[in-house]
């Protein structure tokens, strides 16, 4: 049976796919009909969102699988793999749009450029509204289930909204007598797309290479540990982010005259309290050292 994580992720992903298919077809039609290169570039960007969302779905499906013999620590990092693939697709899309725009700008044949129609302005404005709404919808649900891949998809929506802003400005300027601004808008779109791809890629790589969690979380873990009965100090606190989960290695000091059962009970108490208070902590290993005599 699907857990709440998968249910929410699948629902958001399918809403995203439906919205992007409709929007990309509409923008492509308007771009061709209204003679706007910026709008066609924006349509390609929206179409890439459809493919990237399928990548997110696959990544989340695999990441949600239970641990097995070959993967005893689970499959959470597959979400990071999905995010890296998404970032790569996004970057290639952006660079392709930028290359076409630069070719047009460097050609110098501005008098041959066709002025975009008024319909392109309407399409750009509609795209901004829809994609910004999709950004907030996806972002809220990504934070709710703590999904890195879904959050990457949310920022993909935001990059599309920003690119539509660039398209709107470029199309408006072109209609005011500066036709080259339509191509310049496509170049701005390229920059937004590549920047979004870089941010998604960096976040995914950080989670793939066992980066420590933030200092604030480590301080909260330390305070929680020291507040437990029988803990006389902390010798080591080490964390690592594994996909969207946290693993903790902890060494505490306890009274060396206590029995093994008593120190084991202290360790179990810390283990249970931390996993209860910090939902992102998937596993914590607690080692007990005897405290030096005063």
Image (spheres, rainbow, N blue to C red):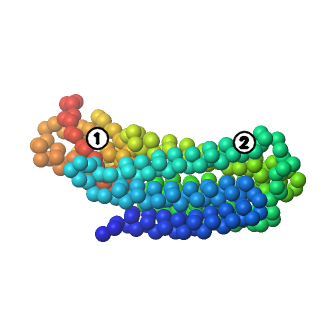
Q: Residue 75, how many percent across, how many down? A: 32, 52
Q: Name above or below for residue 205 compared with residue 79.
A: above
Nearer the camera: disc 1 or disc 2: 2
Nearer-the-camera pick, 87 or 208:
87
- Visible in this render: residue 106? yes
Question: Which residue lies at the image location 69% right of the left edge and 65% below the top edge?
Answer: 29
Q: Which mark is residue 250?
A: 1
Residue drawn 33% across the image and 38% down it? 237
The residue positioned 39% from the left and 64% from the top of the image is 6
Instruction: Give the number of the disc on residue 102.
Output: 2
Quarter containing the N terminus: bottom left
Label disc, if present, on residue 275 of the rendered structure: none
4 relative position to 85: left or right: left
Binning the other alpha carbons within 10 Å of mark 2 as few (below 14), some (14 to 19) or many (20 upward) gives some
Q: Position of residue 255 (x, y in %)?
A: 19, 39
| Left or right, 117 with reference to 131 | right
Q: Is residue 120 left or right of residue 97?
A: right
Ranked by sequence position, the earlier of labels 1 and 2 is: 2
Q: Quadrant of the C terminus?
A: top left
Residue 30 pos. (x, y %): 72, 65
Is residue 1 shown left or right of residue 147?
left
Q: In this view of the protein, which residue sits in the foreground, 94 or 225?
A: 94
Residue 274's x, y, as percent?
A: 31, 52
Front residue of this view, candidates 245 and 233: 245
Q: Is the residue marked by circle 1 packed among few (<14), some (14-19), or many (20+) residues within 10 Å?
A: many
Question: Is residue 92 positioned above or below 22 on the image?
Answer: above
Is disc 2 placed on a helix, strand or loop?
helix
Q: Does residue 229 appear anywhere in the picture?
A: no
Residue at (23% x, 53% y) in the render: 68
């Amino acid at each position: 049976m699907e857990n709440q994580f998968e249910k929410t992720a699948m629902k958001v992903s399918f809403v995203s796919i439906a919205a992007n298919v409709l929007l990309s077809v509409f923008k492509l039609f308007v771009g061709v009909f209204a003679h706007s290169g910026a709008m066609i570039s924006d349509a390609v960007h929206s179409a890439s969102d459809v493919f990237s969302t399928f990548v997110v779905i696959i990544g989340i499906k695999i990441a949600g699988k239970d641990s097995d013999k070959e993967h005893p620590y689970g499959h959470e990092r597959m979400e990071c793999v999905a995010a890296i693939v998404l970032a790569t697709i996004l970057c290639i899309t952006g660079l392709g749009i930028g290359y076409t725009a630069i070719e047009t700008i460097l050609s110098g044949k501005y008098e041959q450029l066709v002025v975009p129609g008024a319909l392109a302005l309407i399409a750009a404005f509609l795209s901004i509204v829809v994609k910004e709404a999709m950004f907030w919808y996806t972002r809220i649900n990504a934070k709710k289930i703590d999904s890195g891949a879904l959050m990457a998809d949310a920022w993909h929506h935001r990059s599309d909204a920003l690119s539509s802003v660039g398209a709107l400005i470029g199309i408006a300027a072109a209609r005011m007598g500066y036709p080259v601004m339509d191509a310049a808008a496509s170049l701005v779109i390229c920059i937004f797309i590549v920047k979004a791809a870089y941010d998604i890629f960096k976040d995914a790589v950080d989670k793939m290479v066992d980066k420590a969690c933030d200092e604030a979380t480590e301080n909260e873990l330390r305070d929680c540990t020291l507040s437990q009965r029988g803990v006389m100090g902390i010798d080591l606190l080490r964390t690592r982010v594994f996909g969207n989960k946290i693993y903790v290695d902890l060494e505490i000091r306890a009274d060396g005259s206590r029995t093994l059962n008593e120190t084991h009970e202290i360790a179990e108490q810390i283990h249970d309290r931390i996993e209860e208070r910090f939902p992102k902590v998937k596993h914590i290993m607690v080692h007990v050292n005897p405290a030096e005599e005063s």
